[in-house]
Amino acid sequence: MKEMKVQASSHSYPIYVGENLRFQVGRLLKEEYSSIMVVSDETVGELYLEDILASINHSHLYYTLVPAGEESKNIDQFYQLHSKAMEFGLDRRSLIIALGGGVIGDLAGFVAATYMRGIDYIQVPTTILAHDSSVGGKVAVNHHMGKNMIGNFYPPKAVIYDVQTLESLSGKEVRSGYAELVKEAFIGDEKFLEELFSIKLGDLSSTQLTEHLYNGIKVKAAIVEADEKEAGIRKYLNLGHTLGHALEAENGYGKIAHGEAVAVGMLFALFISEQVYGRSLPYQQLLEWLHTNGYPLQVGETSPEALIERMKSDKKNIGNNIQMILLRGTGDLTTEEVPEQELKEYLKTFIGKLV
Amino acid sequence: MKEMKVQASSHSYPIYVGENLRFQVGRLLKEEYSSIMVVSDETVGELYLEDILASINHSHLYYTLVPAGEESKNIDQFYQLHSKAMEFGLDRRSLIIALGGGVIGDLAGFVAATYMRGIDYIQVPTTILAHDSSVGGKVAVNHHMGKNMIGNFYPPKAVIYDVQTLESLSGKEVRSGYAELVKEAFIGDEKFLEELFSIKLGDLSSTQLTEHLYNGIKVKAAIVEADEKEAGIRKYLNLGHTLGHALEAENGYGKIAHGEAVAVGMLFALFISEQVYGRSLPYQQLLEWLHTNGYPLQVGETSPEALIERMKSDKKNIGNNIQMILLRGTGDLTTEEVPEQELKEYLKTFIGKLV
């Protein structure tokens, strides 16, 4: 098991990454709680809920399941989880455990952040992708007009990552998660980036997975420690997300995997960066790696105009200009306001090249 | 104009109390904002919205009104205000101004706390009662199973109190607000309590009102500075609220004025305290003052059993015991877990005495 600490403004919390950790959740809780509610989805619940419940010895232990998928990250589900918490009699000394991927982490985390104005929660992520959302305390639900628009900054009390739960992931989910790891490598770790470009997603060992998650989380943790509320450098974590979110929204949330959309967005950021800064960047290398590992790169029927409209409602924007996260090189990220017309041209050329 | 500063964990903010301040809201904003949305209700909006808007010189100034009353403090209204904010194009550098009583402050404050994970807001309270909720950063909406169950601790950037807006209040609203002032006096200011017991609510001058609000806020501010997240002494601010909330819930939110319910709750707390601690407390004095000033003291058709059930779901409770805020004297508050059966007996005797 690997362990690291993240310092949030309100408290510090541990992140554990390793094998068999789902059997040790109870042991890893550092505080006494009056009651505990595990929130999971139907798919993950089927696989791991029993293990988690068995690991916790508590007389007021409850669970509730929501349907799997991004559709559950909405205000109704949020409200229903509050109802559940009240029915179970959760109080201010209770704990919520989010067992699942990013949707569960964001949703259950936001319920914890707002239940009686905030109770403790821990993240037990079961996807690679969720390494990103489980660290840093961003919790939210979607609004029909925008992803993650309603939420809080509310750090967990611990993140417990059992890499064995990742073995059941589909190829699509592995690709989705590794896109975020590549992003973190671009932000902060040249050697990690080289390592990632050298592997094939089809044959990863538990040891490699632990190592990669640990490295990715380290980059992420360093950034959220420096900028918890996304006032400065935390924005860099949105590399690839401006177009990525637009692709997700245009296709309908959940239809295209988040990380797959981010992968295309990242490639787009490299494409623009090469032209804006007149530098040679690993655009081609990323493109080939994405190809080799089966990432879908067709933007499909989505029109550039519609994507631009989506990008205009991004949370990073100030006023009406579209802010893009670009880079001059690995570890050297920037934010640029790209004029709408220019962005449209870039996007058309970029999409044309991918076809 | 009187001014004081409150130190929250994230930032410090000013509270202004005085006449004509609604014409100076723009001048009192200390930061530049990309856009501003004023949230008010239809009743208050009719009276003061124009003055507020006219006081702010900004090219992206918007407003939205919700129906007046506690019913608006729900999850649907919360979601609709998020829609409005998105339609108006609010971004992370935008400001929300909550113009109204406690309902608007709690609702619009919670929208600000969660819009893109938190933007700035200021409180412009237009009731006496709202002096309490506008300071300290508690924001929330009601859940059908409990008042204020969904919310955050999220302090405003400023509180701007124009005492002239209080002239339009009904007798009921004045009583409601003064109950919280009496509560604050009980908590921290013997001289203030004497002063309050000496006045008649029917003939208050602007100067007295400013003075009383200032004193009440001072007590409140000192407590929230010491205990922002309600881990300790902030609980004392719930004096009278355990029964008060139960009365409100049993009668249907908004049917009985919050402060009027708290007044009865406070009297009940004094009643129990005299017996538990064997001391003479100003129970009789409070009872007479409430009578003189027209507070409704009949608990009416509400059954003690139903009230006890409501009290059991109070946010202060840990586990299944009912926690009461009691006092040994002015400025000497305590929390006691009162066994359910005992509490029921107290309540029956208390109600019997009031009839």
Image (cartoon, coloured by chain):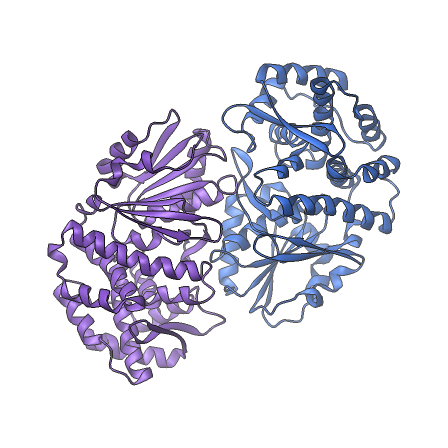
Chain colours: A purple, B blue
- Compared to A119, does B326 lie above or below? above
Is residue A305 left or right of A86 when viewed as pictured?
Answer: left
Name which quarter of the figure residue A329 lies in.
bottom left
Name which quarter of the figure residue B46 lies in.
bottom right
Is residue B215 left or right of B236 when viewed as pictured?
Answer: right
- Compared to B165, does A341 lie above or below? below
Name which quarter of the figure residue A50 lies in.
top left
Closer to the camera in the image, B6 or B168: B6
Horizontal and vertical percent position of residue B169: 77, 46
Quadrant holding the C terminus of chain A? bottom left
For the point 32% across and 31% down, the residue is: A56
Residue extending farthest to the left is A203
Residue extending farthest to the bottom is A278
Horizontal and vertical percent position of residue B74: 54, 43
Closer to the camera in the image, B312 or A137: A137
Res. A141 in view: no
Label tally: 0
Quadrant holding the N terminus of chain A? top left
Is residue A239 left or right of B251 when viewed as pictured?
Answer: left
Closer to the camera in the image, B205 or A215: A215
Horizontal and vertical percent position of residue A25: 31, 37
